[in-house]
Image: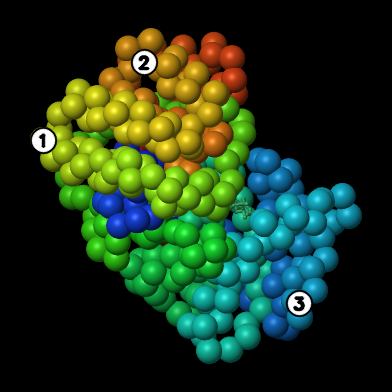
């Protein structure tokens, strides 16, 4: 039995635009998905998940047959299994044989909310399952294989940002295939607001793609997000937290123009701004889920906890650890 974990993330800047080759800066946070892999005698895959939203179910999958506990809607099961299934395909590709596994997932990352639960689950699953059969992949190799899974599950619409960040930890910079850690990133006082909802990553990415194809000004907006990231990474290197906050606000405005915000995300962003946060924006695909704000004081978290539509507000520290083995 092997246990590995990998962190979720927030986007300081650059989600969506990163899909079209602009740079982005995601930061790993201390909320993790933990995956236990146990090799089986047969070649089947059994997945058990104790998830916040899915509320615990188990699925057995093999030979193209999917058996789930009775009362779980099938599309939900298929959506949940897609990423893990893809991760195990990658492990079988590395092993060059059809190894079977029982996979157990425990995650404290809200699902489908912009904090990269999919990337964390895939990264941790690839690490745990390869180690379980005696193969040790480097974090960059895990990131690359996890990216291929996200790319497939999201119908060819994914950047390397989430998976690289989850595998490496810390703050990272991703531009196309160029992925690198940001050394000595200044400490940022992240506060997260969560509306309890989710966004459909694939559908939201498709929406931005259509706008970009239809209107030159939407394509310009995507490029402008890239400009914000380029200025933002200098501010990050200089530790200019006020400028970082201002640029987060700007980035949110452009994401909103691209149609990926929502009433509750906007309400949480404005609650954070009214509470004197240095900046606030949605994180990840949008549509529903989480915002990230910067505030050293407790004001933003308190204001968010009284904001209608905000289900949970919490502080998140930068997690310098990427994927790591917890037990072997
Ligand atoms: N604990 C979990 N157990 C099983 N699958 C999970 C778990 N957490 C996330 N996933 C997978 O990740 C998907 C959500 O990913 P996505 O829509 O990209 O949102 P995000 O990555 O922002 O959380 C879920 O539908 C599921 O397939
Ligand atoms: C919208 C996007 O830039 C980020 C999606 O993040 P999340 O899965 O919502 O955490 C898509 C991608 O980079 O693959
Ligand atoms: Mg995701």
Q: Which residue is mark 3?
A: 64
Q: Nearer the viewer, residue 242 or 110?
A: 242
Q: Which residue is mark 1?
A: 238
Q: Nearer the viewer, residue 300 or 316?
A: 300
Tag 1–tag 3 contact (CB < 8 Å): no
Q: Earlier in the sequence, mark 1 or mark 2?
A: 1
Residue 90 visible in image: yes
Tag 3–tag 2 contact (CB < 8 Å): no
**Left or right of residue 89: residue 183:** left
Task: Give the percent coordinates (x, y) of residue 65.
Answer: 80, 74
Q: Residue shown at 68%/41% (left/top)?
A: 53
Q: Residue furthest bottom?
A: 96
Q: Which residue is mark 2?
A: 273
Residue 31 visible in image: no
Label disc, if present, on residue 21 of the rendered structure: none
Distance of mark 1 from mark 2, alpha carbons?
A: 23 Å
Distance of mark 1 from mark 3, alpha carbons?
A: 53 Å
Task: Give the percent coordinates (x, y) of residue 55.
Answer: 73, 43
Mark 3 CB lies closer than 8 A to ligand 1? no
Q: SS at mark 3?
A: loop
């Amino acid at each position: 039995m092997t246990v590995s974990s990998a962190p979720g993330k927030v986007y300081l800047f650059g989600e969506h635009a990163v899909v079209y080759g602009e740079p982005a800066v995601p930061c790993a946070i201390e909320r993790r998905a933990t995956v236990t892999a146990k090799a089986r005698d047969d070649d089947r895959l059994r997945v058990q998940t104790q998830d916040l939203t899915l509320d615990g179910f188990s699925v057995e999958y093999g030979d193209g047959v999917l058996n789930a506990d009775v009362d779980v809607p099938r599309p939900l099961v298929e959506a949940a299994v897609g990423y893990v299934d893809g991760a195990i395909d990658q492990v079988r590709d590395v092993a060059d044989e059809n190894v079977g596994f029982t996979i157990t997932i425990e995650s404290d990352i809200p699902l489908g909310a912009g904090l990269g639960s999919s990337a964390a689950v895939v990264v941790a699953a690839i690490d745990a399952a390869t180690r379980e059969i005696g193969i040790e992949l480097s974090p960059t190799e895990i990131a690359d294989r996890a990216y291929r899974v996200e790319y497939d599950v999201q119908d060819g619409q994914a950047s390397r940002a989430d998976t690289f960040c989850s595998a490496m930890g810390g703050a990272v910079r991703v531009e196309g295939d160029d992925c690198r850690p940001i050394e000595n990133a200044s400490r940022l006082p992240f506060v997260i607001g969560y509306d309890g909802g989710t966004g459909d990553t694939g559908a939201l990415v498709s929406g931005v793609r259509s706008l970009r194809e239809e209107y030159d000004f939407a394509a310009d907006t995507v490029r402008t997000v890239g400009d914000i990231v380029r200025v933002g990474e200098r501010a990050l290197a200089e530790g200019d937290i006020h400028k970082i906050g201002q640029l987060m606000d700007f980035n949110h405005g452009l994401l909103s123009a691209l149609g990926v915000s929502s009433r509750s995300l906007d309400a949480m962003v404005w609650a954070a701004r009214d509470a004197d946060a240095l900046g606030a924006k949605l994180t990840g695909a949008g549509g529903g889920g989480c915002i990230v704000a910067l505030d050293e004081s407790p004001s933003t978290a308190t204001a968010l906890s009284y904001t209608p539509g905000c289900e949970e507000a919490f502080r998140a520290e930068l997690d310098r650890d990427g994927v790591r083995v917890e037990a072997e």
